[in-house]
Image: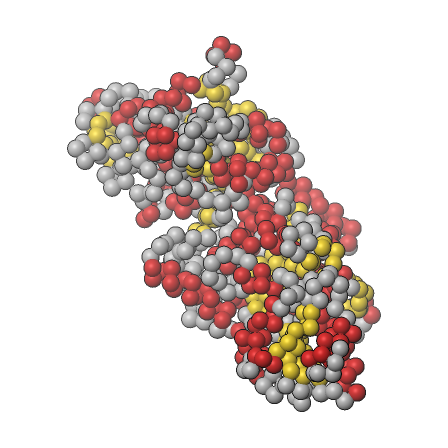
Amino acid sequence: MKNKNIKFVQGNEACVEGALYAGLDFFAGYPITPSTEIAELLSYRLPQKGGKFIQMEDEIASMGAIIGASLTGSKVMTATSGPGFSLMQEALGYAIMAEIPCVIVNIQRGGPSTGIPTHVSQGDVYQARWGTHGDHAIVTITASNHQDVFQTTVDAFNISETYRTPVILLYDEVVGHTRERLVLPEQGELPLVERLRTSVREGVNYHPYLPREDGRLPMSDFGGVHRYNVTGLFHDMWGFPSDNPEVVHDLIRHLVDKIRNNVNRIARFKEYYLKDAKCILISYGSSARSARHVVEYLRPRGEKLGLLELQTLWPFPHDIVDEKCINAKHIVVVEMNMGQILREVKRAVERPERVFIANRIDGVFITPKDIRDILRVIQGKGV
Amino acid sequence: MAIKGYIRERFFPHIWCPGCGHGIVLNSLLRAIDKLGMSKNEIVVVSGIGCSSRISGYVDFHTLHTLHGRALAFATGVKMSLPELNVIVPMGDGDALAIGGNHFIHSARRNIDMTAIVMNNRIYGMTGGQYSPLSGYGTLATTAPYTNIDNAFDTVELATAAGASFVARSTTYHVQQLTKILKQAILHEGFSVVEVLSQCPTYFGRKNRKGTAADMMEYYKNNTTPVGSTAKKENPDLIERGVFVEKEMPEYCKEYDKIIERAMKESS
Amino acid sequence: MAKPKLKAHVINREWCKGCGICVHFCPKNVLELDEEDKVVAARREDCICCKMCELRCPDLAIEIETE
């Protein structure tokens, strides 16, 4: 690897590098801690490659702008934190309903409300899943280190373009602001998914919302030869509003199934020493760094400890988690919230009484010692 | 082309009530576009939510029916991403100036090249007749049963103060002027605002005893005056119509092109 | 310019909602609503082809065809 490809960067910068690598054309955003560096860097970098950056009047407008830009054929992204992510929820639902490829980065901070802006939390896991109203499916991915931030950002664009869905990158303040090494892959090293465009010719009927057999929808860019309607209302294959029960039923099934039927394709995770592990830590984002440290520290000391690091949080890979945990005596979810992934793990595994939590909810990063102390209690070794 | 060439006929008759002014705005808009001779493929109509916003579904352009109040935000993304498109954004008064008020003033401030049409019927029609930011003091609405104590915005003054480089007003009675103004607004390079007084006989009219649709248009005829007329001096209650602002200012997408040029030069 | 000569009032009865705007503003009192509340050209010979009915129709339901 040549030296020029190695950078010492913040996680937020790794995300920017990943987005540019994936072919980002358009970014709209609004300043908010701890995600602001993403906007700052892209305001500098995007025009250098002919891309566009705009600082909108709020996060609602930012989401609107990226959806509009996506319809013209651009690869688009926005980035925010906590309160800004709350503001984006309505338009996020629009992107789900109208099947607009877009990537939304949420660098999590403590909440609710203004909360604790400069400190870490992982409290938005459920908001990412259910923040917008109505039945829907969503893709949410996270990472614990900068190389993975880069990779998952590229993945997010690829998934978004493949399934015509918004993808949420749910990093956290510690990952966003930590500086560490990033090795930039050469162009061509990582596969990139380009938007599937319709081959229907001018003058021939184009049905923008008629899924192919594989569930994918070839798009036609605004400005092209096919003029069609895009709406947040339930709509027919032409994109026209419809309250026909069959149309409504089929569309909601399509929106949910296109994600649910691909849960294993979308699932990304890493595993460490799971084969013989009696106690499995399950973690994600920055807390997985501490969890991994605990595993690496205790393994040589004879403890049969393993780590399942989740990257895809939604759709939650229930089957994978269940299978990996089948022989574990204890399963300990390490996260910085009151137990959001804990709940999913309990739903996923047999004998959920095996599942415990090791968490911090005080804005302070969870340390390996915090986890070890809790493990001792769980394993009956005293406080 | 006859104006039928610009609509999606299979969705007609449209959903608007008998006598609704919004249909007249649609009528005038199509004539303006026809006179300009623009290609249908280069026009994007972006709307929000409400009676007015249904206009996008009926026109045979690229159409984007977005969220309540957010049409201008979506439109900004469309325009900035592909500036060669002509972007037209019809909105209701509540859509544009209550829930979407912030996007309205900021789009004006940026002077991004698009045409915002505020179809002002002084009421929320889709939800059944609640007062809007343009209903005005003393009016009646389903949420103002004892009369409305909210003052109204003056759309023209608001748009002017926010920096729109083209600002005009007309009514559904003055259809020839309206078509001409819409043409000018679409041609204008920068953020254009056209307020159209558009009758809602069903809710505003009925609640406030304004009579039929035709009666409400008679009101526009008798209570408006060309901008700068002497009649306005004699009767300050008259509503002025015409073009209030038309000025050349740097357009946002053009300015961003210069940013790209500069960034590319500095990074090469 | 020669005066335009009327060919026909093309009225789309499916689209006309009978609001009466065209009837009210017709300068020559050519139009009226029939028993089904649809517009008809009752006195077509008086029509001066000003087309104001066509321009003001909210339903795009009336068109003045000239020769």
Give percent across and percent down for residue B178.
Answer: 44, 28
- Residue under the image location 61 percent in, 29 percent down: B161
- Residue under the image location 71 percent in, 70 percent down: A287
> Quadrant location of the C terminus of chain A?
bottom right
- Residue under the image location 77 percent in, 83 percent down: A298
Left or right: residue B190 compared with residue A203:
right
Residue A108 found in image quarter: bottom right
Residue A206 found in image quarter: bottom left
Furthest toward the right, the residue is A3
Q: In the image, is residue A104 above or below residue B68?
A: below
Give percent across and percent down for residue A130.
Answer: 54, 61
- Judging depth in this view, the residue of A18 and A97 nearest the camera is A97
Left or right: residue A179 compared with residue A217:
right
Residue B257 found in image quarter: top right
Q: In the image, is residue A87 above or below residue A251?
A: above
Give percent across and percent down for residue A157.
Answer: 60, 64
> Quadrant location of the N terminus of chain A?
bottom right
Give percent across and percent down for residue B71.
Answer: 52, 44
Residue A212 seen: yes
Left or right: residue B180 compared with residue B254:
left
- Judging depth in this view, the residue of A232 and A352 nearest the camera is A352
